[in-house]
Amino acid sequence: MTFSISQIKRAATRIKKSRGVAYHEALDLASQQAGFANFAHAQQSQASNSNHFDPDVEALRRILADHPDLSDYGLGKAVSFRWTKAQVEEHFAKSRESIAVNIERFRATRDWLRGIAKIKTINPKRSSYGMKHIAEAEIGYITNGVFIAAALSLGFTMRRYPGSPNPSFNISERSITDAWRRIEEQRRRAAQDWNLRRFQAQPSI
């Protein structure tokens, strides 16, 4: 689903009335709900040339628009007994803004997930948080939210758990086993290469 600037402005008016925030803040909040980093980002996207269409950018924006509780943290809002309600909201807004502009990590995760098979049922053994760590062994650091967004964008089915930021997906356990084997083989080869370089660097007697 796509959002026009006029739709964002109408949503901002509702947010301003319901939350009692300034209109410019409401514009940013409405834009974030629509999948943009802020209102300026929404305006830039609307004004951009259609020839610069990026399917990954559009996919991420669509997922964020469909899942307004998704941020780098995962699903829902991070809380702490030390935080005020305003601090919780501020953290969520920043976390959502961060995921909206983290397109390279989103793209890398989508590429990695294309090697993971889907099954008909949810795999409860694997949460998004656990899966992100497996992916990180090959593609580097990603956030929980980026993994969730990437999986949703590729058509994986998600199961939420009440109070948890970490859903599960219909991810094949066999694919995970294959991924771990591949990762272990990469690590084994890296260790061999390191030992060989260390041996070659030793002075001859």
Image (cartoon, rainbow, N blue to C red):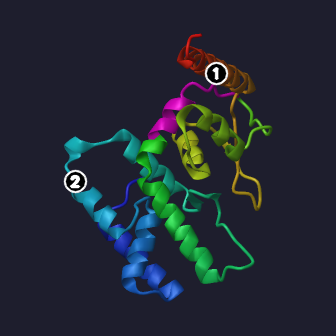
- In the current view of this chain or complex, which residue is farthest to the top? 205
- Type of amino acid under label 1: Ala
- In the current view of this chain or complex, which residue is farthest to the bottom? 20
Q: Are marks 1 and 2 in contact (CB under 8 Å)?
A: no
**Which residue is rendered at x = 36% and y = 81% of the image?**
24
- State yes or no: residue 113 in magenta: yes
The dot on residue 191 is 1
| 138 with respect to 51 (left or right) | right
Q: Is residue 204 above or below residue 107?
A: above
Q: Nearer the viewer, residue 161 or 95?
A: 95
Q: Position of residue 77 (x, y in %)?
A: 64, 67
Which badge, 1 or 2, is on the more N-terminal residue?
2
Report which residue position mark 2 lands on: 48
- In the current view of this chain or complex, which residue is farthest to the front? 205
The residue mark sitting in front, 1 or 2, is 1
| 57 with respect to 182 (left or right) | left
Q: Position of residue 55 (x, y in %)?
A: 36, 40
Q: Position of residue 57 (x, y in %)?
A: 38, 46
Q: Nearer the viewer, residue 50 or 38?
A: 38
**Which residue is rendered at x = 57% and y = 68% of the image?**
92
| Range shown magenta | 107-119
Please identify the quadrant where the C terminus is shown: top right
- Type of amino acid under label 2: Ser
- State yes or no: residue 123 in magenta: no
The dot on residue 92 is none
